[in-house]
């Protein structure tokens, strides 16, 4: 669990260094490479406080704080590179989108996005949000090429393939992530589900992707 700071206080419980890097640099699991094997396996508890922060810390300020913390405590050295890798483009299918525009008030906290193993529920969400969540589930960048600018309510249900989704997508080791049971064994693959349920499609290609390469890291001593 990783809690964003209120009043400058930051708490993380049972997190890997890989998870911290993903948060600090705003990248996903597949965008972090290199480093010793423990980076994505061993877990840590962290408590830190920045003085002079009265309320919720802005995301860019939090990222700066977290990068400084892990660079100091883990003797972390990283660099950014661009690497060509397989990606998906999210596009409108042949017969057009099957999306319901959002109407009414903003969703209640917790209702804007609900996700499970093989399911996504969105309220008042744009295509960028869908593309991001699909990239988390599929372990590959998903680029929005739909051209759709509205906000929609929609649901997506599919049968995940081995390796899709799960805790590995957020930087935890596979051993901590036993395969969950599929809720609906009659659901199609995510590629079929997107076409049938949303009127969209995923196309595979290669493209340059920003990655964080770990050059050095060391286990911190206890305080």
Image (cartoon, rainbow, N blue to C red):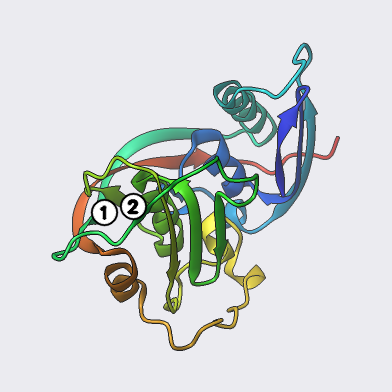
Which one is nearer the viewer's eye here, 222 or 203?
A: 203
- Residue drawn at point x = 76 percent, y = 23 percent: 8
Q: Which mark is residue 11?
A: none
Q: Seen from this angle, which residue lies furthest front? A: 104
Q: Seen from this angle, which residue lies furthest top? A: 52
- Residue drawn at point x = 61 percent, y = 42 percent: 20
Is 95 on the left-hand or right-hand side of 183?
Answer: left
- Residue drawn at point x = 25 percent, y = 59 percent: 97
Q: Which quadrant does the C terminus fall into?
A: top right
Vertical comparison of 160 with 96: above or below:
below
The location of residue 108, given as percent across then percent down, is 63, 45
Q: Seen from this angle, which residue lies furthest left? A: 94
**Dot in front, 2 or 1:** 2
Which one is nearer the viewer's eye here, 52 or 106?
A: 106
Q: Which mark is residue 141?
A: 2
Vertical comparison of 196 with 86: above or below:
below
Element on which disc 1 rests? strand
Q: Are marks 2 and 1 in contact (CB under 8 Å)?
A: yes
Q: Earlier in the sequence, mark 2 or mark 1?
A: 1
Is 43 on the left-hand or right-hand side of 212?
Answer: right
Distance, label 2 to label 1, CA atoms, is 9 Å
- Residue drawn at point x = 50 percent, y = 43 percent: 104
Element on which disc 2 rests? loop
The location of residue 70, given as percent across then percent down, is 64, 33
Is 158 on the left-hand or right-hand side of 8?
Answer: left
Which one is nearer the viewer's eye here, 97 or 13?
A: 97
The location of residue 140, given as percent across then percent down, is 35, 57
* Residue bearing mark 1: 85
Q: Seen from this angle, which residue lies furthest bottom? A: 186
Q: 10 Å neighbourhood of mark 2: few (<14), some, or many (≥20)?
A: many
Vertical comparison of 67 with 18: above or below:
above
């Amino acid at each position: 669990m990783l809690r964003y700071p209120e009043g400058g206080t930051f708490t993380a419980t049972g997190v890997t260094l890989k998870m911290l890097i993903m948060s600090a640099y705003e990248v996903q699991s597949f965008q972090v490479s290199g480093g010793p094997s423990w980076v994505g396996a061993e877990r840590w508890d962290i408590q830190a406080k920045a003085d002079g922060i009265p309320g919720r810390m802005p995301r860019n300020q939090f990222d700066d704080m977290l990068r400084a913390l892990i660079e100091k405590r883990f003797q972390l050295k990283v660099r950014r590179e661009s690497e060509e890798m397989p990606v998906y483009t999210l596009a409108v299918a042949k017969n057009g989108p099957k999306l319901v525009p959002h109407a009414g008030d903003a969703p209640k906290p917790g209702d804007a996005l609900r996700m499970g193993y093989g399911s996504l529920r969105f309220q008042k969400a744009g295509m960028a949000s869908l593309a991001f969540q699909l990239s988390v589930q599929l372990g590959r960048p998903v680029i929005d090429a739909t051209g759709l600018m509205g906000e929609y309510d929609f649901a997506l249900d599919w049968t995940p393939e081995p390796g899709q989704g799960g805790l590995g997508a957020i930087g935890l080791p596979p051993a901590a992530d036993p395969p969950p049971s599929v809720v609906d064994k009659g659901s199609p693959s995510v590629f079929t589900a997107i076409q049938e349920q949303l009127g969209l499609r995923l196309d595979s290609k290669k493209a340059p992707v920003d990655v964080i390469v770990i050059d050095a890291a060391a286990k911190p001593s206890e305080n």
